[in-house]
Amino acid sequence: MGASHASSELVRFSIAMPADLLEAFDTQIARRGDGANRSEAIRDLIRSSLVKQELRTPDAQVIGSLTMIYDHHTGDLTRRLDEIQHDYTTEIVSTMHVHLDHHNCLEILALRGKGKRVYELADKLLGLRGVKHGELTCAATDQSLER
């Protein structure tokens, strides 16, 4: 990453979240046992996200999986998921859809292609309202794995 952020001026900001999510987060922080507080835990999450962003390889061929859990009753989410996926048929190798309960679905996409397109697809899908959790796991491939 760039210059050290340790000497940066601290800025306060507010975050709104459901009480049960905050309670679970506080429990996780307490389990760490290192005396970290919410602020430090959130700084750690942000640092981790920035490092993950730096590891993206937009010009390389990548393979990966995108896992999403979403509430299919949220607006027209199912239609929007399908619309986006139809724009990335070259990158989507396979999909698996699991009905978890009356509201929630698990969807796993196997992906392959130019990093820029794979990351773009993941960002679009994970940014949709109603997607509760999602994670992209990717690795750059060597030339022998290209199509």
Image (tube, rainbow, N blue to C red):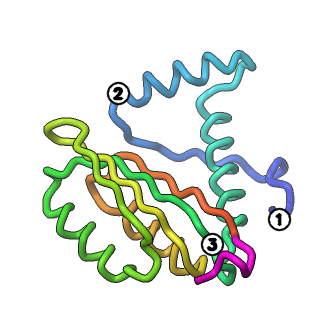
Q: Is residue 100 magenta?
A: no
| Secondary structure at numbered mark 1 | loop
Q: Position of residue 65 (x, y in %)?
A: 51, 59
Q: Which residues are magenta?
A: 141-147
| Secondary structure at numbered mark 2 | helix
Residue ID at (63%, 54%): 49
State yes or no: discs 1 and 3 in contact (Cβ < 8 Å). Answer: no
Residue 55, compared with residue 69, is above or below; it is below
Which quarter shows the N terminus? bottom right
Camera-side residue of 36 and 120 = 120
User: What residue did someone put label 1 on?
Assistant: 2
Q: Decide: few, some or many residues near mark 3? Use Cα within 10 Å; few <14, some 14-19, many ≥20.
A: many
Q: Earlier in the sequence, mark 1 or mark 3?
A: 1
For marks 1 and 3, give the CA distance: 25 Å
In the rendered structure, the answer to whether residue 28 lies left or right of residue 96 reads: right
Residue 112, compared with residue 104, is above or below; it is below
| Secondary structure at numbered mark 3 | strand
User: What residue did someone put label 3 on?
Assistant: 62
For marks 2 and 3, give the CA distance: 38 Å
- Disc marking residue 19: 2
Q: Decide: few, some or many residues near mark 2? Use Cα within 10 Å; few <14, some 14-19, many ≥20.
A: few
Q: Position of residue 17 (x, y in %)?
A: 37, 38
Residue ID at (59%, 68%): 63
The image quarter containing residue 89 is bottom left
Which quarter shows the C terminus? bottom right
For marks 1 and 2, give the CA distance: 35 Å
Say what amino acid the circle numbered 3 marks. Val
Say what amino acid the circle numbered 1 marks. Gly
In the rendered structure, the answer to whether residue 65 lies left or right of residue 31 reads: left
